[in-house]
Image (spheres, rainbow, N blue to C red):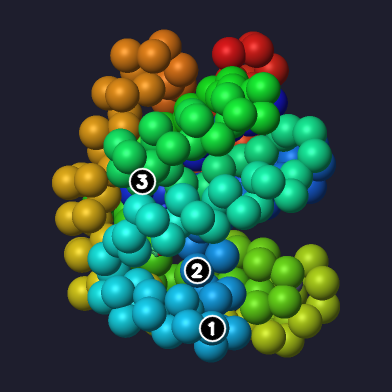
Amino acid sequence: VNVILLGPPGAGKGTQAKKLVDDRGMVQLSTGDMLREAKTSGSEMGLRVAAVMDRGELVTDEIVIGLIREKLSGASGGGFIFDGFPRTLPQADALADLLAQMGQGLDAVIEMQVDDAALVSRITGRYTCGNCGQVYHDQTRPTTQPGICDACGSTNLKRRADDTEEALRQRLMEYYKKTSPLVGYYYAKKQLAQVDGLAEMDAVSAAIAKVLDSGR
Ligand code: AP5
Ligand code: ZN
């Protein structure tokens, strides 16, 4: 199955994507992770997007569609989790075309519903493993041992440059303006399912599993 996880910053897309990778061997395609990698590597594109990302604005469709096209062209089979992509209507159309070219389609689009008030503490408390990408939170999901990733043992735990209240406000504005129209777009295609993203992590995982297993 190929699935999109849709939701505002902090909704839990990355957390649940990682879980699907572990539980089902699916392949996570996070444009945010790809862009952050480009930023860290110091590539020309990475340098170009760095300031835009740190402000919380969206990178151009051209760049992210190019990243996804590249990943899909090297892929065999399916089982993709699209995490943070698509984020605009042109990106959604491009994804449909790319999957069609592979003889594949989307099986579900899962909107993770949360309210803005919960997002501030989720975002400002977040840290991730720079080695394996595991996502943690100061209060709701700390590492078992301080400073050491549970999943891979790395001590390279990091906070994101755009995880400030100010950048979050911008990211939310971008979400409501440019990304939230995708909810109606996929609803009209009868591909939309909604889960309560404010529930506990395991409950959210269970709700997502139910959608995937119902064969939508
Ligand atoms: P991206 O990396 O995609 O960030 P985002 O959409 O803002 O989403 P986040 O990663 O912040 O949140 P999440 O939903 O994954 O939450 P998480 O699981 O970490 O994008 C970053 C930037 O890149 C964009 O601003 C843009 O500039 C650019 N970009 C990326 N894709 C693009 C595209 N397609 N087009 C254009 N530009 C693009 O959870 C958050 C925290 O909450 C964690 O600490 C976690 O432990 C905790 N948590 C999770 N679930 C729960 C729960 N159920 N209960 C309690 N705590 C929880
Ligand atoms: Zn790790």
x 20%, y 64%: residue: 169
**How far apart are the alpha carbons under marks 1 and 2?**
10 Å
x 33%, y 40%: residue: 90
- Location of the C terminus by quadrant is top right
Q: Decide which of tag 2 and tag 3 comes sooner along the chain.
A: 2
Residue 87 - label? 3
Comparing labels 1 and 3, the label whose residue is closer to the camera: 1
Q: Is residue 18 left or right of residue 93?
A: right
Badge 1 is on which residue? 43
The quadrant holding residue 201 is: top right
- Total numbered labels: 3
* SS for callout 3: loop
Query: Around disc 2, counting alpha carbons within 10 Å, would you say few (fewer than 14), some (14 to 19), or many (20 or more)?
Result: many
Q: Is residue 60 left or right of residue 204?
A: left
Q: Position of residue 71 (x, y in %)?
A: 65, 52
x 55%, y 50%: residue: 68
Relative to 188, does residue 87 appear above or below in the rendering?
below
**Amino acid bearing label 2:** Leu
x 26%, y 49%: residue: 175
Relative to 60, does residue 113 appear above or below in the rendering?
above
Q: Quadrant of ligand 1?
A: bottom left
**Amino acid bearing label 3:** Arg
Badge 2 is on which residue? 35
The quadrant holding residue 33 is: bottom right
**How far apart are the alpha carbons under marks 2 and 3?**
14 Å
Relative to 14, does residue 3 appear above or below in the rendering?
above
* SS for callout 1: loop
The quadrant holding residue 164 is: bottom left
Q: Position of residue 88 (x, y in %)?
A: 31, 43
Q: Decide which of tag 1 and tag 2 comes sooner along the chain.
A: 2
